[in-house]
Every structure is written in structure tokens, then in C-alpha cells.
């Protein structure tokens, strides 16, 4: 019989578990009291993912010997795989009481506590595992994941400084380090770390894109043209080179953005179980809509969508919020309003992707709305949409472009942001809303704080151009154009927003190269939206960026009565301001090329009466502006949801929806 055991062990060594099980089945009656056999038999069942049978064998084993440490540890692993965490912890702690230096047990305990969201215990156990195996790479990566979840970024960097010398060729560790440098605003350190990766592995995915992203944050454009050309060439070679969000800032090309999105989504693991139970769909049922975002807070997406969520017809629709983010202040009014607007609100930030998918399916969500797509940095969970959260999935608002995925059915747009000729560059079918695709809010709170030009460091009599977009949307081509405008209007300044000293210094240098006195470039700081809406009135004309337009900041400016001049491109992100201005009835502020943009800006700056006409038009039309008609917007989007819902239950092919 020992020969039979030896044969089984040989089969296990070459991963032939089915054959090993057959041999075990044939001799089990002779070894039912054998600790060794039961241990092996349980391992085979475990390897075949039959955890119930594995547990059965190992429970027999520990009845024979209650101090059988490997059996106790294995039972912990099996219960963990079944999602029975408390039973797993119980057995693993018993194993540790008998063998305090059991590396595998500490490792599994850490994983369990991580899954439960008890990160302090996860960290404690992973540290014990590292004490036993200090250089073990999977354990190092597990600790990094825990530290990131706990937002312990300084400890994260300190730990990386310690372990990278142990694994000097492990590029993933450098990549993680560079990402955290970037999140902390240490962009120079981030760029240098990315350069180290490229020296080790020139083809490491997405590194060059991250280098360029950090350059844009600092307005450090050395070698930018070369970088942009390399990124473009590699996108057309289907290389993993940059995120779609970065490329939207660099290229006015729906073709490039479509290709980049399809490349980007390949990194996300797919759950093959994509079958959604269509029996949950009945024609007369309340439609269950799930909104998924990390931006249900004081954030541009939160600002835009809050009133729409509050306006939903709760008699016909159940709306569910799935909050993916961790960041919101205790007194965040937007988070509070959004949370109350939902039928039910779930904070899923600590859940695994699998748990979020399971929750959505168990709630029988009919339509899942992705409010992020390729935005959100570490907080986005794009993989959950790749695994199908609901029978119908829709890309909306957060990312201005295609998801690139055949798992997302529709994108919400309008006829300006996605012209008919560009539909071929979208993986989704288009839901065309009337007017603009972007919701907004008419009744807003404004700060009572007192502002003057002196307080804002603005000149008393000069014409004040401004741009309130994030600084990383500003590219060399737009600075060149702005410099020409400032040269044509000598008594003028440009008012920008940034808290980044490096970016401010670099931008002033760029303007000085173009013969613009750096004193004419004035930087304001970021302030709460209630204060920002108050200070907007001190500007005369908003000069938009290109190719990534003002989006929420354009809506804010229109609401506040500040004219915004935009340069309309060919891509979604370069046509958003055009959409908002056309809806407002100010098509005269949409330029088709750089020359027209320059001429319009100069003409407005030199004709105060015309400027006042534009401002008056904005203010007097607010009550009738479709942008701020929340009731009509919500009615239209609900109508779209009903149409795609009925198409699905009637098993009709996907097609564009025109409202």
C-alpha cells in the first residue's frame, strides 16, 4: 500500500490531481484512520476546488490528532476559500498556538483581515510573516497593499526604501514608489523613479505616460514633444503606454483615444461568469438603477449630479449609490445630499471587486451607471464593469470618452460632443440627450465672504482674462496662444489657479520666453466652490484650454455670468464647452481654430460694450437655460433608461437612442 501512496504523491508533484483523486478513491477504505492519507486526500480535494470534501478529510485528521498543525492550518485555508472567515480565523489561531513561527498561517490571517477590511490586524499579521521571511516578495507586496488601504503613504515609502535593495531588479516596486510620490505631489521624485524603471525595462507598461502626467502637473515641458510622439507611435502599435485620461489631455483625436481605451482595459481581470439573470427584468417593474462612483462628495462630478439624483422620480425608479471612494470630509454637504438622494446607499470602498459584483447582482440592479470609467486613479474599479454588474451598463459623465469595452452598452452624450461622424470611435451605442449631456444645478449656495480685486491680487483697471481649469490641462500650444492674446491686449492680465509652486514658476518662465512680463500672470489658490462662485465675477473672460476643455468649470462660469471662450476640436473632451455654450445660446463664443480664438478674445477685450452684452445674456437667460433645468434633464435621462430597459427585455439589438 505504501507504493500506492508513493504513486499518488508522484501525481501530485506533476499537478495531476484528478488522477490522484481516482487512486485515492480506490484505496480510501484501507486508510480511513491514516493521518498521512487524510492529509493528502484533503490536499487533492482542495487543489480541485472541492473545499467541502477537503474540510471533511482534514476534520477527520484532527480528530485523530487534535495537535496536527498542518491540518489545522489547512482547515483555515479551506474555510477562507469558502468565505467563512470566522471559522478560518479560529483554526488558524489554533495552528499558531501550536507552532508560533508558522509563516503560512500569518500570511493567510493577514489576507483574511484584509478581505474583512480590518486593516490593523492585517498589518499586524503580515509583519509577523515578514519577520519570518523578510525578503519574501509576495509578502512584501501584500504589506504594500495594506499600507495603501490604510493611507499610510509615508510608511509605504519608508518600507519601499528598505525592501527595494533586496529586489533591485523588481520594477513593480519602483512603479509603486513612483505612484505614491506622484500622489504626494513629489513629482520630481516620481519622474526620477519612473526613469529608473525605464533603465531596467524600457517596455514596462504605462511608465512613459506617468512620466508625462507628472510633467503636466508641474508644467515642466522638457522633452514633451518627443514624449508625445513616442506615446502616439506606441498607441498605434498597441503598446501599453498611457492612460486614456492622460491621452485626452494630449490629443484631439477620437481614433487615438478609442485605441488607447481598448489597450487600457486589457489590464483588468475578467470574471468569466458574465451571465446576468434576465428573469429579474419585467416590463412593469420599478427600474433599479445603480450609480457607481468614488466622487459622491465635494468633487466636480458630485457638483454636477447631485440635483439630478435628488430629482429622480422615486415612484418609478429605485436608485442605488455605490460609493467607491474613501475621501470626504465630515461636513461635506455634497456627500450628505448625495447619500440622502438614493433609495439605498452603500459604501463599498472596503469591499473587494468580487463582493461589489455580488452585491449588485444580489440587489438585482437593472442598469449600472459608471460615473468614472477611466478616471479616479487608485479609486476607480473599472474591473467590476468588465465583469458585468447588471444586464445593462452605461458610461456617463465622469470620463469624456469611450470606455473601449464591449461590456458597456451605452454612453450618454449629445450631438455636439459625439457628432455622427465620430460614432465609429465608440464601443458603446450612443444615447443622445437633447441640449447638453451634462446635468447641473440652478440653485446654488454662494459664500458670504467678501472679495475685492485687491484681496484677490488683481489689478483695478486691467482686463482680466482667466482660466479656472486644473493646471495639468495647460499645454505649450495654449500658452503660445494666450501669450499672443496678452500681447494684443497690453493692459490685461491672466488669472490662473494653482497651489503648486513648481508649476507656477515654470509657467511664468514659459510666458517670459514669449515676451510676457511674469507679473501679468496671477495665481489664485483653490477655495471651496461656494467661494469660487463668488470670486468668478471679478474676471472678464475665461480662456478655455485645448484639447481638454473646461467641463464642470465651464458650467460654473456660465452659471456665474462669466463668458467663456472655447476652441472646439474633434473629440468628446474638446467639445464639452461647445456643448454647454450652444445650449446656452452663445455659439459666438465657440472658435473653430486658433486664429478665430485669438481674434475673438482680442475683440471681446477691446469692446467693453460687447463684453457687457455677453455677460447680460448669460445672467438674463439663466432661468430659461436648459443647462439648469434639472426637472427636464432628469425626465429625459429617465426616458432614456426606460427605452434601453424595454429594448433589453424585448431582446432587441443594441442601437443608438435619440431623444
Image (spheres, rainbow, N blue to C red):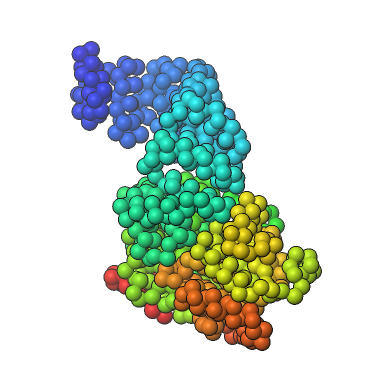
- Residue appearing at x 39%, y 65% in the figure: 253
Vertical relation: 157 (above or below) 218: above
Residue 321 appears in the figure: no
Where in the figure is residue 15, as x and y percent of width and height? 25, 28
- Residue appearing at x 45%, y 60% in the figure: 250
Residue 131 appears in the figure: yes
- Residue appearing at x 71%, y 74% in the figure: 462
Could you say which is closer to the camera, residue 498 or residue 515?
A: 515
Give the total of numbered labels.
0
Could you say which is closer to the camera, residue 262 or residue 133?
A: 262
Judged left or right of residue 50, residue 464 is: right
Of the 4 image quadrants, the one containing the C terminus is bottom left
Q: Quadrant of residue 71?
A: top left
Vertical relation: 649 (above or below) 96: below
Could you say which is closer to the camera, residue 105 or residue 304?
A: 304
Judged left or right of residue 554, residue 248 is: left
Where in the figure is residue 481, as x and y percent of width and height? 54, 68
Could you say which is closer to the camera, residue 467 or residue 376?
A: 467
Where in the figure is residue 433, as x and y percent of width and height? 44, 77
Which residue is at the far top? 2
Amino acid at each position: 500500500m505504501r507504493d500506492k501512496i508513493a504513486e499518488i504523491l508522484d501525481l501530485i508533484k506533476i499537478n495531476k490531481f484528478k488522477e490522484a483523486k481516482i487512486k485515492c478513491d480506490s484505496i480510501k477504505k484501507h486508510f480511513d484512520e491514516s493521518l498521512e492519507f487524510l492529509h493528502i486526500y484533503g490536499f487533492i480535494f482542495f487543489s480541485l476546488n472541492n473545499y467541502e470534501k477537503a474540510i471533511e478529510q482534514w476534520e477527520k485528521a484532527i480528530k485523530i490528532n487534535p495537535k496536527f498543525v498542518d491540518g489545522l492550518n489547512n482547515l483555515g485555508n479551506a474555510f477562507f476559500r469558502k468565505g467563512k472567515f470566522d471559522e478560518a480565523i479560529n483554526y488558524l489561531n489554533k495552528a499558531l498556538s501550536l507552532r508560533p513561527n508558522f509563516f503560512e498561517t500569518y500570511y493567510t490571517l493577514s489576507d483574511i483581515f484584509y478581505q474583512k477590511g480590518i486593516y490593523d490586524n492585517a498589518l499586524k499579521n503580515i509583519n509577523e510573516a515578514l519577520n519570518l521571511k523578510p525578503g519574501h516578495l509576495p509578502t512584501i507586496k501584500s504589506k504594500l497593499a495594506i499600507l495603501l488601504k490604510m493611507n499610510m503613504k509615508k510608511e509605504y515609502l519608508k518600507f519601499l526604501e528598505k525592501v527595494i535593495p533586496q529586489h533591485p531588479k523588481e520594477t513593480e516596486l519602483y512603479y509603486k514608489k513612483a505612484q505614491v510620490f506622484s500622489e504626494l505631489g513629489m513629482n520630481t521624485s516620481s519622474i526620477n523613479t519612473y526613469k529608473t524603471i525605464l533603465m531596467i525595462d524600457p517596455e514596462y507598461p504605462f511608465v512613459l505616460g506617468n512620466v508625462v502626467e507628472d510633467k503636466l502637473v508641474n508644467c515642466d515641458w522638457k522633452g514633451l514633444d518627443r514624449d508625445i510622439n513616442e506615446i502616439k507611435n506606441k498607441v498605434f502599435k498597441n503598446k501599453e503606454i498611457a492612460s486614456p485620461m492622460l491621452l485626452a489631455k494630449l490629443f484631439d483625436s477620437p481614433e487615438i483615444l478609442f485605441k488607447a481605451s481598448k489597450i487600457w482595459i486589457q489590464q483588468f481581470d475578467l470574471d468569466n461568469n458574465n451571465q446576468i439573470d434576465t428573469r429579474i427584468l419585467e416590463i412593469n417593474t420599478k427600474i433599479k438603477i445603480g450609480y457607481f462612483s468614488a466622487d459622491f462628495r465635494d468633487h466636480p462630478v458630485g457638483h454636477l449630479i447631485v440635483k439630478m439624483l435628488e430629482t429622480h422620480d422615486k415612484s418609478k425608479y429605485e436608485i442605488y449609490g455605490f460609493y467607491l471612494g474613501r475621501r470626504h470630509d465630515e461636513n461635506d454637504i455634497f456627500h450628505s445630499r448625495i447619500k440622502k438622494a438614493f433609495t439605498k446607499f452603500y459604501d463599498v470602498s472596503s469591499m473587494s471587486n468580487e463582493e461589489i459584483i455580488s452585491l449588485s447582482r444580489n440587489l438585482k440592479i437593472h442598469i449600472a451607471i459608471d460615473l468614472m470609467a477611466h478616471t479616479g486613479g487608485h479609486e476607480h474599479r473599472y474591473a467590476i464593469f468588465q465583469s458585468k454588474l447588471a444586464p445593462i451598463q452605461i458610461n456617463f459623465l465622469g470620463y469624456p470618452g469611450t470606455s473601449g469595452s464591449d461590456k458597456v452598452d451605452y454612453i450618454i452624450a449629445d450631438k455636439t460632443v459625439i457628432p455622427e461622424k465620430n460614432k465609429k470611435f465608440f464601443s458603446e451605442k450612443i444615447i443622445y440627450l437633447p441640449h447638453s449631456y451634462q446635468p447641473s444645478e440652478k440653485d446654488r449656495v454662494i459664500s458670504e465672504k467678501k472679495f475685492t480685486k485687491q484681496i484677490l491680487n488683481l489689478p483695478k483697471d486691467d482686463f482680466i482674462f482667466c482660466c479656472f481649469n486644473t493646471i495639468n490641462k495647460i499645454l505649450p500650444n495654449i500658452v503660445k496662444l494666450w501669450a499672443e492674446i496678452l500681447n494684443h491686449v497690453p493692459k490685461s492680465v491672466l488669472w490662473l489657479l494653482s497651489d503648486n509652486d513648481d508649476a507656477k514658476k515654470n509657467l511664468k518662465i514659459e510666458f517670459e520666453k514669449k515676451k510676457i512680463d511674469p507679473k501679468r500672470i496671477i495665481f489664485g489658490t483653490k477655495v471651496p466652490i461656494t467661494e469660487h462662485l463668488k470670486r468668478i465675477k471679478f474676471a472678464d473672460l475665461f480662456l478655455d484650454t485645448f484639447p481638454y476643455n473646461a467641463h464642470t468649470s465651464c458650467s460654473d462660469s456660465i452659471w456665474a455670468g462669466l463668458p467663456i471662450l472655447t476652441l472646439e476640436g474633434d473629440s468628446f473632451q474638446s467639445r464639452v464647452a461647445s456643448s454647454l455654450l450652444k445650449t446656452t445660446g452663445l455659439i459666438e463664443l465657440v472658435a473653430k481654430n486658433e486664429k478665430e480664438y485669438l481674434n475673438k478674445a482680442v475683440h471681446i477685450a477691446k469692446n467693453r460694450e460687447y463684453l457687457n452684452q455677453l455677460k447680460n445674456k448669460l445672467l438674463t437667460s439663466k432661468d430659461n437655460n436648459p443647462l439648469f433645468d434639472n426637472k427636464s434633464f432628469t425626465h429625459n435621462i429617465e426616458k432614456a433608461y426606460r427605452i434601453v430597459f424595454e429594448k433589453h427585455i424585448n431582446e432587441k439589438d443594441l442601437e443608438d437612442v435619440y431623444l
